[in-house]
Every structure is written in C-alpha cells, then in structure tokens.
Image (cartoon, rainbow, N blue to C red):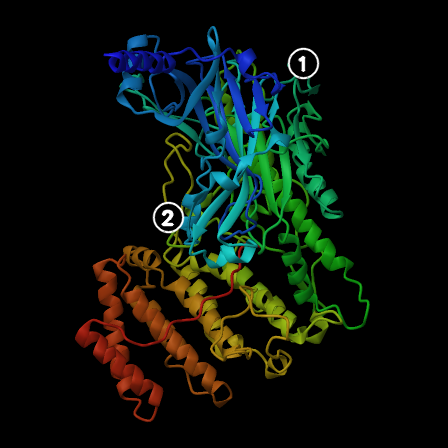
Amino acid sequence: MILRIIFIVCALMVGNAAIAKPPSVKSFTENFEYQSGYFDLYYQPDSGKVYVLVKRFGQPFLFQSSLPQGMGSNDIGLDRGQLGDTRIVQFERFGDKVLLRQLNTYYRAESDNPAEKASIDEAFADSVIAGLPIVASDNNAVLIDYTDFLLSDIHQVSQRLQQTQQGSYKPDPKRSGVYPARLKAFPKNTELEALVTYAGSKPGEYVRQVTPDPDSISVHLHHSLIELPDDNYHPRAFLPFSGYWSIEYEDYAAPIDQSMVKRFIPRHRLEKKNPAAAVSEAVEPIIYYLDPGTPEPVRSALKDGAMWWNEAFSALGYKDAFQVKDLPADADPMDVRYNVIQWVHRATRGWSYGSSVIDPRSGEILKGHVTLGSLRVRQDYLIALGLTSPFSQDNADTSAQQAMALARIRQLAAHEVGHTLGLAHNFAGSENGNASVMDYPHPYVYVDDNQVKIDKAYSVGVGLWDKYTIAYGYKSFDPNQDESRQLAKLVQGARSSGLNYISDPDARPGDTPSAQGNLWDNGTNPVDELKRIIDVRQVALSHFGLNSISKGTSLSSLEESLVPIYLLHRYQLQAAAKLVGGIRYQYEVKGDYPSARGQTAVNSEIQQQAVDAMLNTLSPAFLAIPESLTRLIPPKAYGESRNRESFKGRTGLAFDAIGAAESACGYTLSQLLQSGRLNNLAAQYNNPLTVSKLVEQIVAKTLKAPDNKDYRQLQQRINAVSLEALVTATLDSNLVPEVRAELEYQLSQLQLWLERQSKDPQAQMMARQLEQFFRTGDWKSNFSILPLPPGSPI
C-alpha cells in the first residue's frame, strides 16, 4: 500500500512537471547578452545558444537565408554572399513549441470576401520549415530556442553537393556553432549567423580542390528576419518587351474574362522628393556598397561601372538617385539594409551574379547583392596578352592590356548591378550598336597595320536599351494618367527606335531557333563578323609565341594562353549557326503593330552564307597549329600541371596540336548538326538548303576533301570527327522521323562511296563501321570527340 501511494505521488509530480509553465523571460535570460530589434535576441555565451523573443503570432514577415562564407568553387555553386530563397513566413504557437510556417504566396484570391481568401489558403499547402521549443514566456510573448534551426541546412548545401556529385554530407552539430559577431537586431530586421560544418564521405573532385579536409566542409549560414514593407509601394506591370524579369502569381478571384496569371516587375522603391520638379532628389536614393576587400585598381573600376546607372536615372529627372559608396567597416554584407557589390574568390574562374531580396507579394526589391568573380579580370588580361604578344623585350609595357581587362570589369559591374535593379539579359544589344550592358560582350578587337588592336574592346556607359528599361521601371507618371498607357508608349517608342530584345530562353546555345540575340558576339551580321574575327585570329596566331608570355614564365604555359586565341571564333560561330534553320521574331503582343508580324524564316541565301563560313573552319589550313609554335610548347614544367584551361589531348604529357584541332572541328559540327536546328531546317519547306544538302556539303568539305600530303594526319582526324558527328546526330532521340531518314540515307550513300576507296585504310574501316551500324543499329567506333576547354565566361 505504501509503495502504491509513493508511485501515485511520483506520477503526480511528473505530470505537474510536464505541464508546468515555463519560466519568465527575465529570469531565464539573466546574464544573457541582449539586443533589441524587430525580433529581440538573446545569446548565452556559456551554452552557445541563441534565443528569439516572439511577440507577434500569425503576423507575416520575410525570412531570407544566405551564405556569407562559401566554398570557393564555381562548379559547386556555393559562393560567398550567395542569397537563398526569400520566404514569407509567420510564427504560430502549438502547445510548447512555435512553428515557423512558410506561406504559399503563388496561389491567391484578390478579393474582399474573407471566405474566398480562406478557400485558397485551405486548397493549397503551406510548408512548416522549423519547429522551435519554447523555453520562457511573459504574457503573450515567448522565448524560443533558435539554435538548432540556425544550425540546420536551410540553404540546402547537402542537396547541392549531392546534385554536383561531390559526396554525401549533412550538418554535424558537434562541429557547428552560433557566430555571435553577426548576431544583430535592428528596428526592421534581425540578423543571425552560424558556422555550420558538413560531415560526409566520398568527396568529389571539386570538394577536394577547395577544402583542407574534404570530409569536413565548414561554411557560414545566415538568417534574416525582415519586417514586410508597407503598402505604399505600387507594383508595376510586366510586359514581355519591358526588359525586366517577371514576378507572378495566380489570382483565383480574377473575373472569368481575365487571365488568372498576374505579372509584375521587380524593382527598387524610388520616389522623388518633389514629384512636380523637373529634377529632384529621391526620397531614398538607391545606394550600393563596395566590398572593402576589393583591391585597386579593380575597386575603382567596379565603382565607375556601377555608377553608369546614374546616367539612366538622371535622364528621368532624378538627382543622385543612384549612388555607390564604401561599405561601412562595421556593416554586415548580408544585412538586408545594404545593397552590396562583393568581390568573390574561387579556385577557378566562373560566373558573376546579380541577385536580390524581393518581396514576393509586390516585386519590391529590398536588397541587391552582386557577386563578381575575382578571376574574370585575369582571364581578360590573358586574352589581351595573347592577342597582342607584347613581350618583345623585358619589362614590356602592358598598360594597354590591363586597361582592356579593367574596361571589362566596368562593364561587368554595370551588368550585374543591372540584374539587381530588376533587369533581364538582352542578348540583342550587340546588334543595336552595343545598346545594352545587359548583353554578354565579346571584346571588339581589330587589325591595323598587321597588328591586333584592343583599344576599342569594350563600350563605356549604359546604352539606349538600358535607358529605356530604367524608364519603364522607375519613371514617375502623373497619377491622373493611365500608367498602363504610359508604359505602352515607352514600349512603342523603344520599338520605333529600332531596339531589339532577346533574352535567355531564345539566346542560350542549344536548339533555339532565334536568329537574333547571341552570347559573346558582335555586329549586326553574324556571317560578316565571323569572317572578320577569323581574320583577327589569323593575325594574332601569326604573332603568337615567346612574345606572348613574360620573362620567367614557363614555356609550357603557352598552351593555356593559346586556347582563347585559337578559339577566338567560337562564339561568333554560334551566332552564325543560329541563322541555319533560324527564324526572326519579337516578343510581340496583340496590338503592338497594325498587323501582327509573327515570325519569318531567315533568308535562304543568308543561311547558305552561314554554312559556307562555318564549313571554312573545318579546313586543315584553318585548324592546323604551325609546327614552329608546337615546338615551343613542351610538356608541363615540373611543379605545374595541366588544368581545365588546357586543351584535351591524346598524346600523354605532350601538347596535342591535332587534338586541339579535333576539338575545334567537333565544335563546329556540333553547332551545325543540333537536332532542333535540323528539325527547323526541315520544317522550312521552301528552303533550298535542305538537311540532305547540308550533310552533302559537310561530307564534301571533310570526308571527300582532296588529299593534301601537308595535312594528311590532320585531315584523317577531321574525317573521323565528321563521321562521328554525323552518326551521333542521327542517333539523337529528339530528331523527327523525316530528318532521321534523310541522315540515314546520306550515311548509306557515304558508306557506298567509302567502300569504293579501296586504297584508303581509313575509308575501308569507316565503311565497315557503317555496315555494322546499319546491320545491328549499334554504333561502335571507340572514338569520342575531345571537348573544348571551357570558354564562358569571359
């Protein structure tokens, strides 16, 4: 009986403890470090835990994750300063814990009917991204332990490492901790940061390249809790020709005669202090802050390039509305209050980015964050040296080459800042006399007196397209006027001035049929520019050699300097290829013109000119690297090694000049024989350039080319590449049946011709391979075309 009583008493004590109220915030946080802000912060140094005081339940706010300290690998894509997703979230209490719910903002009901709004909330799922234990409370406020969430993988680092095949990793809390130096609370935002270590196994090549211990990857993760902006911002409608990215949602309360999809542009909030004045300062100017770790003269170049945008804002009647300043010494680059231009280091050259924190409800940009890869400037300098070969004497003056590299950095700064202003790429800018910094510019180099000149490599300042887009996004309109009509007038004015606009989906290399809008090209006529750049290439190669490297540089490093010069034509080749089977069109909506323009095929004569120009890059004379140059490039000097910037080869340690030609030949053919291009070509019924005629021309230029004893081995390699490319194209699953039939017929005719070349061992081998291919359906050549070294970005 006594034991039973003791058991009941113990059970009651346990039950009372389970339902006991948590301690007060004051008593729990005694001797904690405290910061007051949008969400109050408490930090306990002894335990290393961080706590957040929640007073507002069910009140939405912005949650932004980011990566203030990354991995330094362009291939992995986890860079210093990288922004994660911007989420609208709210805290909700459930018993002894607080849930952080991410709201579904894509599906909405813009209605005054609460029940209609509720029906959308109930129809589409939200996502709870964290469960946070309550450790103390005061009336309606609770203190939550935020530590575990701060140490979690909200940035999806593990997923990224898995996607890039770099191993299996997950956060290790024993080797992770809150970073108190970056715990900061302000009236409208609260910032938290942690060092998080990812433990894993089977690390990949890129992880091994950038970590001292590839089984342990330590980075920093950052959380920003941000007050939602007020309702005084006016969203601006998106139009396909606006030049902006699109923010969209679906409105289930839209009238049946209107589209449910609502689109608007991302942009900063900008208003004049005096709206009636022709020129006025801004209520709050757009200020970008420079990374203090950027060295000179790059630092000044970044500032100059970014400041180009002020010209566009000045044209709208703003005075100093866009500014660039130094980041304050005590500022956190991830703090949402600062638009930042960061100079980011990686183990290899890679892309630069312009990202933003955007209110998904309205498109208002709260923070622009620019990531500029530090090795880009060195790549441009390398190209400039290869083009000009200035080292004819010791202590040669390379100021012109450095000036070209810095000119590119100015353009790059303007480009990436443009993204953070809301602008999309315009890859047709080069067709309008470099009308936009939102294009990818190839250096304009030219020949004068048998020397390559680089003094006009990059344009200066924003272009006409850029001024138009800033007007579309940031111009203030008379509130008594219909804004949609004013925007339509801006669009019509840009069209009338001849400005073109082609963005990523229609310009990226691949099967896109757009004949306009290309990456890294120049000029209005892709064929003429291809011929011109080939002439520049020839002159640059004729001077290339010892004078291309400085004294004390290993001869073997000539190979990496040679790559961008030997392949100087590669991007203009892409532009010419898009003419073949290409079409011309605009981002057009009904009513833009009195009668719809739609699309038109590229003139067949122009298509043939493009084919002729491209086929000339398959000749041995074009592809051959002079023996005098190959003799200068020995195997890698001790202490150095081949890398991703080197040519791929088949000759072991020795430089493989024919392997380089193989890669270039394969690239030209891959551009001509893309499945989408061939399908489009076949669909142009009145085009005399058929798929069969294209293949016949390729075969005539390569496999049936006359024997030339000076280039016999190179020609044999070209033949092998040609056959491999043709068969590979035939096997592409995206080919339509009628095109595949044409290709197979041309291959059968080629087989018959090869069989008749009884004295040519290579021809006989190819004939046997084709015979087996047609008999079995399997292609067995044991030959895979060497890929090019990476080109983009330049």
Quadrant into which the C terminus falls: bottom right
**Quadrant hosting residue 10:** top left
Q: Is residue 491 visible?
A: no
Which residue in the protein does label 1 denote? Answer: 274
Of the residues under marks 1 and 2, which one precedes in the sequence? Answer: 1
Disc number for residue 600: 2
* Foreground residue among 485 and 38: 38
As drawn, which residue projects farthest toward the top? 139
Left or right, residue 220 beside residue 716: right
Amino acid type of the residue tagged 2 in the rendering: Thr
Q: Nearer the viewer, mark 1 or mark 2?
A: 1
> How far across and how far down the image is residue 81, in percent?
57, 39
Q: What percent of the width, then of the height, locates residue 161?
A: 44, 49
Q: Is residue 122 visible?
A: yes
For residue 54, which numbered disc appears in the image? Answer: none
- 341 and 452: which is toward the camera: 341
On screen, residue 661 versus residue 286, left or right, reads: left
